[in-house]
Structures are given as structure tokens and as C-alpha cells.
Image (tube, grey):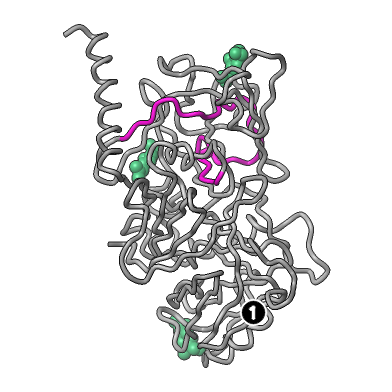
Amino acid sequence: MATPSLSWFCFVILLCSAAAEALEGSFSVELIHRDSPKSPFYVPSETPFQRAGKAVRRSIARVRGIRSNDKGEPSAGITRIDADYLINITIGTPPVSIVAIADTGSNLIWTQSPPCDHCFPQEKPLFNPRESSTCAEVDCNSDECHLFDRTNCASQGSTCQYSVSYGDKLSSVGNISTDIIGLSTLTGSAVTFPGMVFGCGFNNRGPFSTHTSGVVGLGPGDASLVSQIGGNEGSHFAYCLVPFFSTGKYTSKLTFGSDALLSGDGIVTTPLIIDSDTLYYHMTLEGISINGKKFEVSGSSEDDDITGNMIIDSGTTLTWLPSDLYRQIEPEVSAAIDLPRAKDPIEGYNLCYESSGVLKGAPSITIHFTGADVVLNWYNAFFQVKENITCFSFVPTGGQPMYGNLAQMDFMISYDLDLFTLSFKPYDCAN
Ligand SMILES: *[C@@H]1O[C@H](CO)[C@@H](O)[C@H](O)[C@H]1NC(C)=O
Ligand SMILES: *[C@@H]1O[C@H](CO)[C@@H](O)[C@H](O)[C@H]1NC(C)=O
Ligand SMILES: *[C@@H]1O[C@H](CO)[C@@H](O)[C@H](O)[C@H]1NC(C)=O
């Protein structure tokens, strides 16, 4: 068989295999925790607790706002892109592998591309759109161009450009293109999606790590990976994050298709609210129960609108509570735990104890979202950050409250972007 038809044939097979998996309804890919052995960030000499400490510091950096409120608490609001999970994708024909930051707080998929005005050093080869036979630039007049909010079209008919920034310092500017994006599934097969819209970044600024070569936005906007795949597979996805100290042994997963819709017992569902910038997934936190005693978010019994008051973010480690609510629950948590208090080794925490392993006397904690009571495991709220120190990983913020990834571990969390619901099911994610 002649080479051209062979490659044409393979191309068809790839599309066919994607279609076949799509018909079967589901596939899962790995979400790589950045401190796990499969991550390029992995430092073998670090102890698990050093990694835990780094995750907390990252979380604080990710949310520490430019402004603080008058009580000196950090005002949450994501200002950094160094999220906790990575995702591998391929782009183009032949496929080029990209290790990207998986970010639920943004929508674009982009990678660095030559010719660069300014590219940060990256370990993996650059994706060159000219070397991909399936890559096409997007015209300013096309629908694809309008998937992006911040597009820049110098003149009608010219190449559609994007510009995205993550806080003060990090940004990427480039051309919008379309090409095949491939994912390798946990069953070992490849799924490919032709005609995916993404950015070829030629002006990328800020302290991006050399270990990654771009960002995969998992946000609610039309250009995100989940929305673009969702267009084919039904607009829903789910993920299951394995507990922090098991990330080396087990795989956290991101699931598309029918398996992303939960079934069985123990499912609770709350409305999913998308902000007008379509950047974040919000839900409504009404209160928290500690050992059965309920504390409400202030405003929930008055006329104040608390709808959508909390962001769910897979990229940040800690959970940031409205300071009023935090102040109510802290004494209750501390009264429940009869262990010697320890000095916070990280300076981000309020409550730390001398304890290692299972925390003795950890109170039972239920998070009350509208319509959904999520009953936590002790390790969703307490995190060991040193040999003998475990801290309460819920902290107060004067800014945007966020539901971080420690609180989400060992839950299958399903996002339905058609019905605008978010469902939680307790799950052994290592299984
Ligand atoms: C992701 O890609 C990197 C670099 O190509 C590779 O080392 C790593 O094993 C991949 N991880 C997974 C889970 O596929
Ligand atoms: C961006 O588009 C312009 C105009 O088509 C082209 O000259 C340039 O090479 C493109 N750059 C990238 C990185 O795709
Ligand atoms: C941990 O703290 C407890 C309580 O103070 C103490 O009894 C124990 O010796 C400490 N263990 C280590 C390894 O430091």
C-alpha cells in the first residue's frame, strides 16, 4: 500500500475509533497530580509531607489576592495558574504531546508555538502549526473565533487572535487554530477529536514552568476542553480525585460521556451556577454542620443573595470559607479535638494539632450546598503537613470562597452543563 493512502487510512481509523468510543458512551483520562511520580514536577527526594506543605503554599499563592481585606485575611481570587493537576494531550498530525496545566478556572486550550515573539523555555518540543497537516488558522469571521471572549481581529478576514491573562503577570497571546486533539484513555486507547479550537501562543509571559507547555481550560466557557468534547459527548463530565497521600499509587480520573452521569445510592445534587465571565463553576454554600450542629452562612436567612457564593476549583488545595462562617465553626472544631495544638508550620492555617495518620476525634463535617448535604471524610478537612502535624484545611477568606481539591477527594463529582447541576457521590477513587 502506498504511504499516502496508508496515512489517510490511519487517519480514518483514528476518527473511527473516536466515534466508536463515543458510541459506547464513555472514556476516562488521567488527571496527573503534579506531585505524583508521573508528573514532570515530581521530586523523588521529597517526603510526602514536604509535598503536602508545597501544595498548601501553592494554594495560598493561588488565592492570595492583590488586595487584602481590613482584617488582614488574604482575599481569595485566583491569581496564579500553577494548579494542582496536569493533563496530557496531543495536538496535530503527526501528534505532538503536550503536558498542560488542567485548570477549571479558565477556558482556553493553548500551547506555545513558533514563530515565537516570546516563549518561555519548555522541555518538550514546541507544537509547530506549519508542521501539522491538519492544523488550520481560524478566520476572524468564523464561528470558532467567537468561542473566545477576548479575540483580537485587526482587520476583517484576518487571523483570529486571542489574549488571555491569569492574574497580574501571566499571559498568552496567539492565533486561534483548529486541529485534532488526542487524549489517551485509561484503557490504553487513544481518542481523537478533529476540528478542536485552541490557541497557538506566540507571546507567552510570566513564570510558567519549563515542565509544561500550555494550559487546558476545563471551565464552563464554550472554548474549554470539556465544552468542546461535551458538544460531541453530551455536555457533562466528572472527575474523581484520589486522596493526596495515595496519588503515587492510584490514578485520578476525568471522565466524559455517560459514565460521567452518576447513578446508584448516595448522590446529592446542587445547582451549578456559571458566572457572566463563564470562568468559574459556582455553587451556593448555605452552611456547615460540625458534629450535627449547623452554622449558616450569614445572609442566608436574610434577603442577601448568597446564590453562587462559592467556586468549586480543582486547582486549589485548601477550602476557603467566608470568614463569618469560619469564625463560627472554628471553636466547634477545636472543642471536638482533644489533641495538643501545634504551631502552624506553613503560616496559612489557623488550627493545627500534633497528630499523624488518622486524626483522633475529628468531628463529622457536613457541607450544606443548596439541596445537597455533602458528608465529608475526616481527610477532606484535615491535612497532614509535617511528620507530626495535621491542620484543619478549611481557612477563612475575606474574598471569594472556594471549595478546594482536598475536600473533593474520594467523591465522584459530576458537572452537567445541560441541566446546570453538580452532583457528588462518595467514591473510592483509587478503585
Ligand atoms: C504525560 O506525558 C509525559 C511526557 O510526555 C510522560 O512522561 C507521562 O508519562 C505522561 N503521563 C501520562 C499519565 O500519560
Ligand atoms: C499567526 O498568524 C500569522 C498570520 O497568519 C502568521 O504569520 C503566524 O506565523 C502565526 N503564528 C503562530 C504562532 O501560529
Ligand atoms: C507527636 O506528638 C505527640 C503528642 O505531643 C507526642 O506524644 C509524640 O511523641 C510525637 N511524635 C513524634 C514522632 O514527634
Question: Could you say where residue 319 lies in the image, as x and y percent from the top left?
Answer: 58, 67
Residue located beneath label 1 in the image: 296
Residue nearest the viewer, comparing 301 with 55: 301
Question: Could you say where residue 123 lies in the image, as x and y percent from the top left?
Answer: 47, 33
Chief secondary structure of the magenta span?
A: strand
Q: Residue at x 52, y 54 (%)?
A: 420
Residue nearest the viewer, comparing 140 with 108: 140
Type of residue at label 1?
Answer: Glu
In the rendered view, tell whether residue 402 sits above or below residue 335: above
In the rendered view, tell whether residue 112 sits above or below residue 428: above
Instruction: Please state, as top left, top right, bottom left or bottom right, where the N terminus lies in the image.
Output: top left
Residue nearest the viewer, comparing 7 with 131: 7
In the rendered view, tell whether residue 132 sits above or below residue 124: above
Question: Could you say where residue 391 lies in the image, as x and y percent from the top left?
Answer: 55, 76
Counting the numbered discs, the total is 1
In the rendered image, residue 352 lying in the magenta stretch gets the answer no
Question: Could you say where residue 267 lies in the image, as x and y percent from the top left?
Answer: 39, 68
Quadrant assignment, res 183: top left
In the rendered image, residue 196 lying in the magenta stretch gets the answer yes
Q: Residue at x 48, y 53 (%)?
A: 419
In this picture, which residue range is highlighted in magenta?
A: 191-220
Instruction: Please state, as top left, top right, bottom left or bottom right, where the C terminus lies in the image.
Output: bottom left
Residue nearest the viewer, comparing 410 with 367: 367
